[in-house]
Image: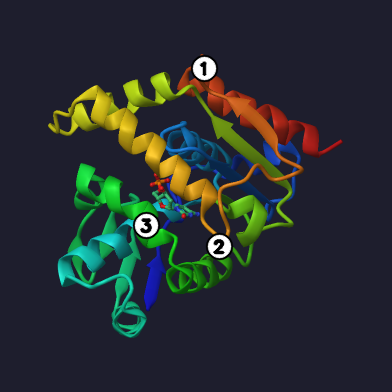
Amino acid sequence: MRIAYFGLLDFAPPLWDNYSVRRNIIITIDGTAASGKSTTAREVAKRLGFLYLDTGAMYRAVTLKVVRDGIDPDNVEKLSRMLKSTDIVIDRENRIWLDGEDVTFQIRTPEIDRLVSVISAIPLVRERLVMIQRELGRDGGLVCEGRDIGTVVFPKAELKIYMDAKLSERTKRRKKELGHRGIDVNADDVRQVLSSRDEIDSTRTHSPLRIPGDAVIIDTSRLTIEGQVERVLEEMRKLKS
Ligand code: DC
């Protein structure tokens, strides 16, 4: 398996020094589905001139490949062979390429939403992806979001955030996001898929979604995107003292 990552935000000025923190720190953002992690992580990374790593996109790309190849997730041998021959590229605009094809939108369909938690609970899949994520974050200067980032992938990260929001609010956001992409979905279905994903993600045996002991918890139910970003930056500013 090869994951090439070109996420360096070279168009953003390196603002990390404005915050008087070392440029190689790691910020982790974990939390429930559609709680605002991606939007916040991307914007914080941009403002700091840090890398932004969306680990959910990696699990989604692997899920898409499992679906396309018609692989039985219980067939470990086949799955292992598939993972070895999988090529994922994340480019500078955070588009995701799977074996040379741009799948940025295909990995965010309701079908993949339904299946991704099942595929990402498979130990073999996690093992491979976690190894790559650690390698990508080796030099720090990174905002990384997912479910097990502060607990398993980067347990020594300087700043850990855990985001959550009311299910009704997350449902509204996800429905709106899908609507923007021309996918019309019923709110009840969205709510059901979100809560079932949270359930699977937080009860799986391997690296379940947990609030890291040393995390700052942010409830985004009543926050704007700017408010979410500002909350994270506020915690960043505290790091220097
Ligand atoms: O962040 P997201 O909704 O795109 O993530 C999709 C799924 O991927 C999520 O439901 C569980 C899985 N995931 C994971 O198991 N570990 C991560 N670090 C990130 C995502």
Q: Is residue 240 left or right of residue 93?
A: right
Can you say whether 112 is above or below 132 in the image?
above
Q: Are marks 1 and 2 in contact (CB under 8 Å)?
A: no
| Viewer-side residue, 38 vs 150 | 150
Looking at the image, tell me whether mark 3 or mark 2 is earlier in sequence order.
3
Q: Position of residue 82 (x, y in %)?
A: 29, 79
Can you say whether 195 is above or below 2 in the image?
above
Q: Is residue 59 left or right of residue 106?
A: right
Is there any visible trace of residue 177 in the rendered image? no
Can you say whether 118 is above or below 217 in the image?
below
Residue type at mark 3: give it: Val
Mark 1 and ligand 1: say if the CB distance to the nearest ligand atom is below 8 Å: no
User: What is the count of numbered marks?
Assistant: 3
Q: Are marks 3 and 1 in contact (CB under 8 Å)?
A: no
Q: Which mark is residue 206?
A: 2
Residue type at mark 1: give it: Leu
Q: Position of residue 35 (x, y in %)?
A: 47, 31
Q: For mark 2, does the 10 Å Cα neighbourhood hold few (<14), some (14 to 19), or many (20 or more) residues?
A: some
Instruction: Write the residue at 79% across / 38% down.
Output: 239
Residue type at mark 2: give it: His
* Placement of the C terminus among the 4 image quadrants: top right
Q: For mark 1, does the 10 Å Cα neighbourhood hold few (<14), some (14 to 19), or many (20 or more) residues?
A: some
SS of the residue under disc 2: loop
Quadrant assignment, res 76: bottom left
Instruction: Write the residue at 66% across / 54% down.
Output: 151
Looking at the image, tell me whether mark 1 or mark 2 is earlier in sequence order.
2
Q: Are marks 3 and 2 in contact (CB under 8 Å)?
A: no
Q: Which mark is residue 118?
A: 3
Instruction: Write the residue at 45% across / 48% down.
Output: 200
Find disc 1 in the rendering and name its residue.
223
